[in-house]
Amino acid sequence: MAARPTPYLDELNPAQREAVEKLDGPVLMLAGAGTGKTKALTSRIVHLLNTGRARPNEILAVTFTNKAAREMKDRVGRTLGQTIEGMPWLGTFHSVCVKLLRRHAELVGLKSNFTILDTDDQIRLLKQLIQAANIDEKRWPPRQLASLIDGWKNKALTPDRLPSADAGAFNNKGGELYAQYQTRLRELNAVDFGDLLLHVVVIFQNNPDVLEQYQRWFRYVLVDEYQDTNVAQYLWLRLLAKEHQNICCVGDDDQSIYGWRGAEVGNILKFEKDFPGAHVVRLEQNYRSTPHILAAASAVISGNENRLGKTLWTAAQRGEQVKLIGHWDGDEEARWIGEKVDGLLSGSAPEAKRRENARSEQMVEEVDRLHDLNLQRGYNSRAQLVDALKESEVFKENVENEDLLWELATRKEEGRSVEVCFQKFDLEDMAILVRASHQMRAFEDRFLTIGLPYRVIGGPRFYERMEIRDAMAYFRVVTSPEDDLAFERIVNTPKRGLGNVAVQKIQAAARENGVSLVEGARILLDNKGIGGKGAKELRILVDNIDRWRGLGVQREVEIPLNDDEVIDDGTTQSAMRFAPAGDNMPHTELAEIILDESGYTSMWQNDKTPEAPGRLENLKELVGQLANFDNLQGFLEHVSLVMDNDNDDADAKISIMTLHAAKGLEFPVVFLPGWEDGLFPSQRSMDESGLKGLEEERRLAYVGITRAEEVCTISFAGNRRVFGQWQSQMPSRFIDELSEEDVEVLTAPGIYGGGHSGATGDFGSGIQDRVQSANTYNSPGWKRMQDRAGQRGLSQPKESKHTIIDLEAVSSHSVGDRVFHQKFGYGEIMEIEGDKLVIEFDKAGEKKVVAKFVTASTD
Ligand code: ATP
Ligand code: MG
């Protein structure tokens, strides 16, 4: 048989090809950002399928985010020219483990229809246990226990394997409470997120036959973002790949950003030991970012001591420098970014975009032509180029826009590209990446105000809204009879006259009889253990739940296919198909019935608060969304897994997400706001002794910058309201670490445009000073860096990178003098600071410049 064509291999460089074509045995691809690791991994999947080495269901491919998994699926599908719904084992660690656990739940004492608890439920449950153990929950908050337990699960530590030091945590009750919690989860037929992996690892460890089955089944294992695997994930992978060793992991130690959640970058380093003879491939060409962006990112990450170190280069043309800008406060930063986004936006229609692009090209050519013409004539000043542009036919629409013309002339003279002045992007091309999710609020507010469509990925989520959670609790009660937490949530919502006492009675009845709360309620009612209005209402609720469950039963019948549905492809395809029996109700309808009959919908209809209409809208949206799923259970599972809510709607939107959520993604335009000490790097990492936390923050900075393809803008604010408190901020120490030649410092027009009286308030002599002082050796940030370097016995960090000006000649000017500056034109001296002048330029606003570049003017 002739070999199938492999066009996808032609898109790869030799190193990538090597990693793709070496299908058997362990392969480790260790390379920096944007070098095509994910592309190679995806091509490897394609190659496995295309060469017939593996069928779709024999490939286990794991990534970290749902978005990444979906993109990988799409890429494979596109390359093979077909949809690959048949790749059931391509997904996130969690989604793959849910499937495995449903198949073998009984091996860890669960039923296959277990519920996946979210953080809220988890905390509620832990709170009950803490109360029952008579521990003061103010001193020992449930959240703290939740995070301890999470940490243990990430390390694959079941309660019986917990080292005594850990068990003694949390007022000496940690181990005990962990054990109780696990027992309680089993009783509820529920798991938390950490359990998904832990249970599967335990199943594999305790049941060699099951493990063997999957070792045979998953003939090829592939892992993206390997640097962020935790111990449990690592054990899981090692177990699965132990026999055939067909495992390919790709990662970048510089992008390890989940140490705080138990990720072990050491897993990468151990790979060659775990899989002897591993083939290690290094990739060095970056295909994503322009040279300035790449260089700036490399400069920052070079500040880390603990790294393997890599070479990265790009063949891309010299693009724009990374932009750096300071703002008065966080809202101002959001306002500026909103404007910038608007400015970068192309007309949305493809035709308009095409026209704009053609026109941009024409404009770029015209600037080139006029510049050359000037040179030929022996002219070489900005003013002359601006004059020429004003007279050009091509720029006749822009004659009024002097800023643009000056910008073009300046760029041309400095040999920088002018394309950027015309560059246009779609909203989808842009992303705002924040360090902390509370930063998102300013952007959401701003974008809502100016009507800029945005999506929040991994932020305050639709599914976390109260009404959505209530509705889902109703669905859970119907689909999972043992789900007591869901029952607790809805038993008195809407109000049914069932207060704490009644609920305690129900709980007691359930405990005594070893049954779920719904059953407990039934027993209580039968025994007349509860009276009054509450009893009547509770009876109605319990009967309703029974009825809803009955309506929702998924019964399938086999029905013959119509003639035209039978595909004669030579296979022995069954001429029957399964379909829901006519007597069971579509789950969307059932959902509406549940919300109506329970009184939940009317509760909000009768509610007079301003939020009520919005909540009703959300409920509608929820029911509408159900249609995309086969049944309620499938939907609930989806919600627990896809909590990062990257709503899949088709409309173009700018993305707002945390730096963590942006891992592996790329965007032509990236905004990185909030680069301030205490926010980024986080206060916690700065307070910590040792460098571990700070180095992780620096890797996060590296991840952030390397998401950008063409335009990367870093910003900071001088003041920020953090949890209701105004704080004044210092620019991030990471700004110091950017390489000067790759950064262009911009001025915030809002601050400088209208003069500098009052507007700058606490800023003293202005933002430029701030950038400058934060970057000179007198600043606290600089001092800290020096101290740290000293402690580490390192050579002192290089001096300031982002001085706006040099410290040289002494000024012979006086305040009030009119002057001319090569770059900024005419202006008036406002202040003299040694050899530097603060000048209010007529066009460029206030700037601080070096005196020697200024000449006296008589204009
Ligand atoms: P990260 O570390 O951020 O996850 P990565 O190493 O996984 O990055 P990819 O996302 O695979 O990098 O690739 C980055 C970009 O470079 C993508 O747009 C991809 O299509 C492109 N690319 C990768 N390899 C090549 C190649 N050989 N030729 C051209 N473009 C490539
Ligand atoms: Mg990648």
Image: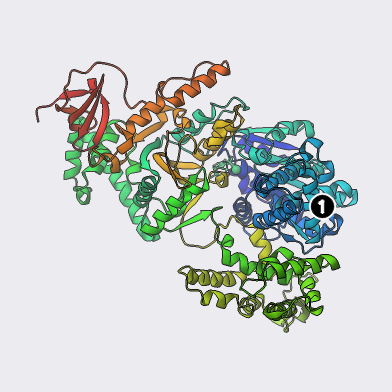
Which of 612/226 is in front?
612
**Circle 1 — which element?**
helix
Compared across the picture, whether 433 is left or right of 536 comes to left
Residue 533 appears in the rendering:
yes
| Residue 283, x across and y down, in percent | 61, 34
| Residue 158, x across and y down, in percent | 81, 45
Report which quarter residue 740 is drawn in.
top left
Q: What sort of colour scheme is used for the picture?
A: rainbow
Three-letter code for the amino acid on which mark 1 is drawn? Trp
**Residues packed near mark 1 inside 10 Å, few (<14), some (14 to 19) or many (20 plus):** some
Residue under the point 70% across and 34% down: 268
Say above or below: 778 vs 644. above
Report which quarter residue 506 is drawn in.
bottom right
Say above or below: 319 vs 187. above
In the picture of the structure, the residue carrying the numbered disc 1 is: 217
| Residue 608, x across and y down, in percent | 47, 73
Quadrant containing the C terminus in the rendered view: top left
Report which quarter residue 581 is drawn in.
bottom right
Quarter holding ligand 2: top right
Residue 585 appears in the rendering:
no
